[in-house]
Amino acid sequence: MAVCDFIISGARVIDGSGKPSQQLDVAVERDRIVDTGDCSHWHADSLIDAQGLVLSPGFIDSHTHDDLAVFKTPELPFKISQGVTSVIAGNCGISLAPLKPQTALPAPFPLLGNDEEYQFPSILEYRKNWDRSPGAVNIALLTGHSSLRLGHMSNLEQSADPSAIAAMRGALKEALQQGSIGLSTGLDYPPAAAASTDEVVQLARVLHEFNDALYVTHMRDEGDALLEAVQETLDIGNQAGVPVVISHYKCAGPANYGKSSESLAMVDAAVSTQQNVSFDVYPYTASSSSLLYHFVKDAESVLLAESTPHPECNGKLLDRIATDWNCSLPEACERLYPASAIYFQMDEADLERIMRHPAAMIGSDGIASMLTPHPRLWGTFPRVLGHYVREKKLFNLETAIHKMTGLTAHKFALKERGEIKVGNYADLVLFDPETIIDRASFEQPAQICDGVKSVWVNGQLSWHDKLSTPARNGRFLTH
Ligand SMILES: [Zn+2]
């Protein structure tokens, strides 16, 4: 009789491929799935009765800023409690590595950590730290364009000259050789806004030398110039010959509500020419970032999450603060800085159209460093499964799980993950499809969701009955 560590029996298994669920047993030995189906010929150290529950691959959070959070809070309760077993970090142009800044950090860098916390001059140094102190979930790292700019340019308010481009290309190449999976940009943020399209193309061409490396972008504009920004992104992907992921896909600002039909048609047209394009999206109509006036303009209302000089204003509406201070909105932003905010700036119909799209992956964009985070940090995945699948019936459970697992693993080329099949890593989540729901709200954002029973990372039980186990079994994922 073959021997394994445990068998999960009787669950409705949704394998992550998008195919219909099946009633299967799943056997795990060490870090791998060793059998599925009838596992009665296995002798297991423990048998887990999962009648009435769904077993799926652990969720892959396709958009995070967890570069530093994995070291500061390695138990990562805001991830593992949702069933997340892998994160893609280094998004929006700001990666913790490779960067050891010589000057004070401009926005949005403080979203990750303070000046002293950027202490990894290479991906290799970051990996050494990870090996000493791994987190509870797996991590893959993008290399941030803004981090490269800050490390290799003295004036960020211009496009890179040939020598700066050569230096950044060299640094990006080294990062990819050391295990980074791609390049991210944040062209909507001050450190990168002056970069020309050509600057980005020249960097993205480095990706082409590496199998599966991809270009991931917080685009130059998500509001009035959304369509131009989508076009620029598709052009960059085409000119560099690399896969493209558009970050936190949205149509920002009331004037742009409804534009998702047009912008998604551009994605469809690109896909029909065999261009590899996908995007991540979070299930909320409010965004969150540094407090910057150019984001304020595109919002219906803005909630101050936190301000360093004026903590007494945290949780107040920006309009109200400006009225109380008898000043303009730009002036209020300046006085509150450094600060972060939540922007109510999207339309539900756009959000649903975007989530339904076959190229849509679920990604939280959660920011763990914020005292008052956006609820997406703790609620993204159960909100999709509870609110959008069970309550609103936006799509079925198999489709939702695919957008959180198999599709993401495929797009980011995370091998042997994202699907329940023999030989794959045993990243697994067991949840109750009738009760799973987010509890995090804008008022009380740090709330554990309901309905997630157990989570395994590389075969180790890491979350059970709303509690972390001591396991810190995450791996550093490379291509
Ligand atoms: Zn972003």
Image (tube, rainbow, N blue to C red):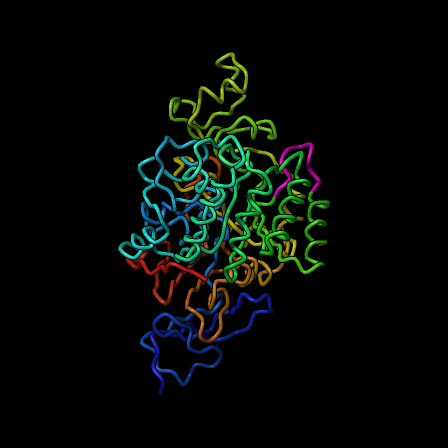
Question: Is residue 268 visible to the viewer in this orientation of the structure?
Answer: yes
Q: Is residue 26 magenta?
A: no
Residue that protrudes farthest toward the top in the picture: 326
Question: Is residue 377 visible to the viewer in this orientation of the structure?
Answer: no
Q: In the image shown, does 249 or 348 lie closer to the viewer?
A: 249
In the figure, is residue 157 to the left or right of 311? right
Q: How many marks?
A: 0
Quadrant where the image shows the N terminus: bottom left
**Residue 125 location in percent, x, y?**
32, 51
Which image quadrant is residue 136 in? bottom left
In the figure, is residue 2 to the left or right of 253? left
Which image quadrant is residue 127 in? bottom left
Residue that protrudes farthest toward the bottom in the picture: 1
Residue range of the region highlighted in magenta in the rendering: 250-259
Q: In the image shown, does 113 or 105 lie closer to the viewer?
A: 105
Label the magenta part by its dominant secondary structure.
loop
64 w.r.t. 371: above or below: below
Q: In the image shown, does 84 or 464 lie closer to the viewer?
A: 84
162 w.r.t. 327: above or below: below
In the figure, is residue 370 to the left or right of 191? left
Residue that protrudes farthest toward the left in the picture: 132
**Residue 27 location in percent, x, y?**
41, 75
State the residue at coordinates (42%, 44%).
Answer: 95
Q: Is residue 255 magenta?
A: yes
**Residue 281 location in percent, x, y?**
57, 48
**Residue 253 location in percent, x, y?**
64, 33
